[in-house]
Every structure is written in structure tokens, then in C-alpha cells.
Amino acid sequence: MLLNYLKLAVRILSRNPFLTFINIAGLSIGLATFMLLWPLAEFELHSDQFHQDADRIIRVGVDYQWTDDNQTWEGFSGAFHYIGAVYEMEQTMPQVESRTWIM
């Protein structure tokens, strides 16, 4: 069965050489881009792992939801930018040892 699929693919690709070139070029460019960007993405995912006690570091975020009559219209997830709330967390929660501000 696999041999039949390969024969069919070769026949279709040989009928349209220009489209075959476009498909193979697009696949090659996409694969090359992925291979170039993957190390950068992997570095960004592990960028804060060199800190001492890295497993105890958290980032506070916020999830906005705009609703009207129990129907969600819009949403936004992002970083928490109100320094007063972070200061209040440090004062009221004994688990928080220290804080910092990231912009």
C-alpha cells in the first residue's frame, strides 16, 4: 500500500514540475527557519534557570475578560504591571520573600 502512495506521489509531482519546485522550496525554507529559530526558543524557555532556587521563582500575571450579559467578548492575558499590588502581596503574604519589577 505504501508503494502505491509513493508511485502516485511521484506521478503527480512529475506532471507539474513548477508546482513541485514551489512545494519543495517552501518546505525547505520552513524547515530551515525552524532549525535556525529552535535554539533561540529553547534558550528563551530556560533563560531564568541559572538563578539559585530557580524552582521558587514565579511571575504574577493577569487575565482580563470583558463580558456583557454573561457573554465573553474579549480577553487578554499578560504580565502584571501595577507595582502597588505586588507591594501589597509582599506585605500580606508571608510566602513572598522578595519581589522585583520587570519592564
Image (cartoon, grey):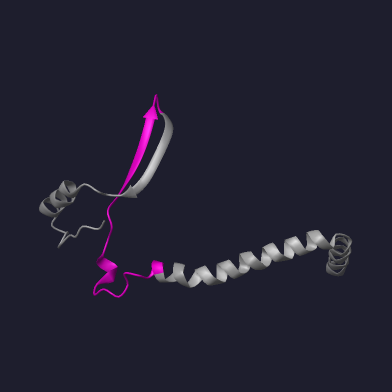
Farthest residue, direction top = 69
In the picture, the quarter occupied by the N terminus is bottom right
Q: Quadrant of residue 95?
A: bottom left
Q: Nearer the viewer, residue 98 or 32?
A: 32
Q: Quadrant of residue 23?
A: bottom right
84 inside magenta stretch:
no
Q: How many marks?
A: 0
Farthest residue, direction left = 91
Residue drawn at 62 percent across, 68 percent down: 31
Q: What percent of the width, then of the height, locates residue 63? A: 34, 44
Q: Quadrant of residue 51?
A: bottom left
Q: What percent of the width, then of the height, locates residue 46? A: 38, 70
In the picture, the quarter occupied by the C terminus is bottom left
Farthest residue, direction front = 18
Residue drawn at 86 percent across, 66 percent down: 10
Q: Which residues are magenta?
A: 44-70
Q: What percent of the width, then of the height, locates residue 93? A: 14, 53
Query: Relative to residue 81, is residue 28 drawn left or right?
Result: right
Residue drawn at 89 percent across, 64 percent down: 11
55 inside magenta stretch:
yes
Q: What percent of the width, then of the height, locates residue 25? A: 70, 65
Residue drawn at 39 percent across, 24 percent down: 69
Q: As displayed, is residue 80 above or below residue 74?
A: below
Query: Relative to residue 38, is residue 88 drawn left or right?
Result: left
Q: Nearer the viewer, residue 69 or 26?
A: 26
